[in-house]
Image (spheres, grey):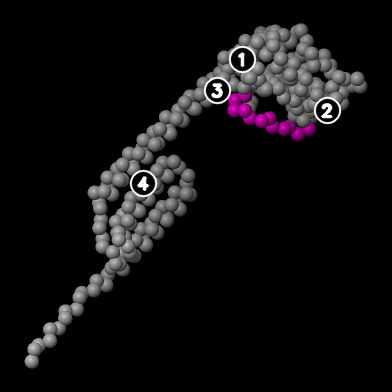
Amino acid sequence: MARRSKKQEEHVNHERWLITYADLITLLLVFFIIMYAMSKVDVQKYAVLAQVLNLQFQKADSVLDKGSGISGQMTPKQGDSDSKDKDYTKQNINDQKEEKDKAKPDENEKEKREKELQDLLKQVQAYIKDQNLEAQVSASDTERGVAITLNDLFLFDLGKADLKGGSAPILQKLASLFPTLNSKVSIEGHTDDLPLATGSPYKDNWGLSFARSLSVLRYFSDTAKLDDNKFIATAYADTMPKVPNDSDENRSKNRRVEIIVLRDGLAPTSVPK
């Protein structure tokens, strides 16, 4: 009687589940790295995170090649992975260097503009002192830029917008300083809260304040022959008082024209009336 050959049972590897478990642990690690990186926004940390993600996903691809971790064959490609990591790191470093190089001109331009503003402030303040104009003109460094404030009666007759002859020297001095500046100049008219006198050519304080700022702008563009694209004329009437309009002295301070050499084009901040 022929002996029946007993088919040998194929050995089953019951530990292949560890591959899938390892994938899960890797993904959890990546998740917590992302959560940590998001808690502290930093360009360098994003770069490191990108490198870690790239490395981990490449490793995951090699583990899960041809399907799932259970039925697929493991085909690690360590050489290719290392090469890709090196290429990515090199590219990332080059990208960061390019970003820094692009930022340098902006920083240099900002420093240059700030130096221009400080030099302008010193020259204007020195001129005001030399000409004994402290009661009519002031210059200060504000958040918006260098603010040159001129009292309304120094520039105009009461309720008028035509420049007085005595205002020409200070305006000509400013005109001589503006061409070298790489900044916009905002000319802003302000009034107090009193209504205009009967018979005024202007409908209200808005019209008067704008006409006054426009008169100063036209001096710079027409008389001094400066590029009018450098200037902005605006009117605020009584909406931006320096001090409350509760006395004649304070109202006199609020009637003014401000020439502001802008630092960053910031809008004015209202002061409570």
Return the residue at label 4. 51
* First of labels 1, 2 by sequence position: 1
Q: CA distance from mark 4 to mark 2?
A: 63 Å
Residue at the (60%, 25%) spot, across then down: 263
**Which amino acid, mark 1?**
Phe
**Which amino acid, mark 4?**
Gln
Q: CA distance from mark 1 to mark 4?
A: 50 Å
Callout 4: few (<14), some (14-19), or many (20+) C-alpha neighbours within 10 Å? Answer: some
Numbered disc 4: secondary structure? helix
Return the residue at label 3. 114
* First of labels 1, 3 by sequence position: 3
Q: Position of residue 72 (x, y in %)?
A: 28, 64
For residue 178, which numbered disc appears in the image? 1
Q: Give the position of the C terminus as an image quadrant.
A: top right
- Between 66 and 236, the one nearer to me in the picture: 66
Q: Position of residue 147 (x, y in %)?
A: 66, 21
Does residue 6 appear left or right of residue 26 in this picture? left
